[in-house]
Amino acid sequence: MLDNQKIATFKAAVRGGVIEPTDKGYDEARALYNGMIDKRPRLIARCTSAADVISAVNFGRDNALVIAIRGGGHNGPGFGSCDDGLAIDLSLLKGVRVDPATSTVRVEPGCTQADVDHATHAFGLAVPAGIVGSTGIAGLTLGGGHGYLTRQYGLTIDNLIEADVVLADGRFVTASEKQNADLFWALRGGGGNFGVVTSFAYRAHPVKNVYGGPIFWEIKDAAKVMRFYRDFLAKAPAKLFPFLGLKTVPSAPPFPQEIWGRKICAMISCYDGTQAEGEAAMKPVRDGLPKPIMDGMGMLPFPALQGLFDPLFPKGLQWYWKGDFVKELSDEAIDVHIKQAMLAPSALSLMHLYPIDGAVHRVGTGDTAWSTRDARWSMVIAAIDPDPRKAKDLKKWGRGYWEAIHSFNPGGAYVNFMMDDENDDRLQTTYGPNFKRLTEVKKKYDPKNLFRVNQNIRPAA
């Protein structure tokens, strides 16, 4: 039981402040990115330093509280909070330091991808990450991280140099290839199972302006586009990252009003180079496919491309998503995709296929916790709408679509595309030959499973 004196002592130890249910601002502080999930933690510790994090971990452990960790707050299943426990909120830890001499970046865990892009862009650099600016960099990294630069430079974890971590016993350690190498291995894809990361160090790469944007085709052309895309990707240059989507044109600017609300097959691409080079890379697409209803590709700063979708997905929407790794995209699977996409319950609901080939395949299965190095895509089915009354329909469609397509796929999925209703078998399949090693690392660094509000890897027996 928590008494007032214990809480008062804890508050004195956390410079960023500790919020209770009776405090003004509690509802705002506990609100999650996914409006479908409503949790009420007993305490919210707003950390501003590693010292605050150490105090919070020690307090939660010593008082037998459930602990949840929130970074940028973009987590789909709501693992950034908990009921009746302690939410350790890292969103105030927003520091980014770029070292242009070494092309490295030190990032604190409350940063979004947009925060990192803003800081690195001034130096003509970028860290390989995702495709949405509001994504929290911490959760994205710990789950693996794939996005516009993946084919060229690998996953986010393939560009991680080291991480500072507060462990379950309150110790502060650094994990890298040379220090606590087993922990560093596990952090690269194993999620938030092993401790609270208080800073990440990344390699950055020369990226400034890119040739990118969306091309939309009528849904009647979707099968043709998807078959072409399947074969084109294997031959596409590594500097080109085209991902494919089945979706609905948003009924809002900057999209032309005459195509609002139309079902489409979309290819959203990024070419890291000049306009002439980008147009040459996309020439087979434009020459080999029917005339699109919109071609929005052009030169733009890399952070602008990263933030392209942010206005469509503000905090508080209803979300339900399911994922799979995809190794083959057969004609039969394409037909199932199109059939299910046509049943989407809302204009924002979608299916995306993100390439995870190229540089990703040059890293060994056992080199990081992320083991599925032979997949070609990471698939997400995302059911999305602002109306809470649609929650049941969103879940039904998301699950139904996934059940219809899952038999075509190998079994595992990107952990950042999993909800809180996944089972242990699914997680074991995702990590494959690395799962047992992950349980051993968990046993070493978190033997009592203090950090369990996540896609949980239990300690080895």
Image (cartoon, rainbow, N blue to C red):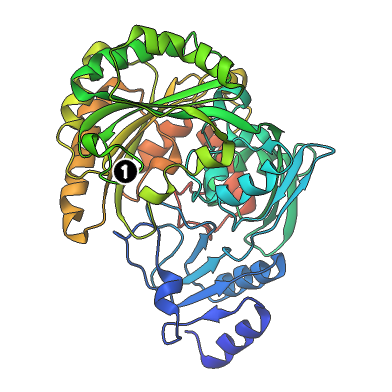
The image quadrant that residue 104 belongs to is: top right
Vertical relation: 178 (above or below) 316 = above
Vertical relation: 52 (above or below) 18 = above
The image quadrant that residue 314 belongs to is: bottom left
User: What residue occupies the far bottom of the structure in this picture?
Assistant: 5
Q: Give, as a three-letter code, the residue at label 1.
A: Trp
Crowd class of label 1 (few under 14; some 14 to 19; many from 20; radius 10 Å): many
Q: Residue at x 24, y 16 (%)?
A: 223
- Lateral position of residue 413 relative to residue 178, left or right: left
Q: Residue at x 56, y 52 (%)?
A: 112
Q: Secondary structure at mark 1?
A: strand
One can see residue 439 in this view? no
> Which one is nearer the viewer's eye here, 38 or 290?
290
- Lateral position of residue 91 relative to residue 379, left or right: right
> Which one is nearer the viewer's eye here, 9 or 345?
345
Q: Residue at x 60, y 39 (%)?
A: 188
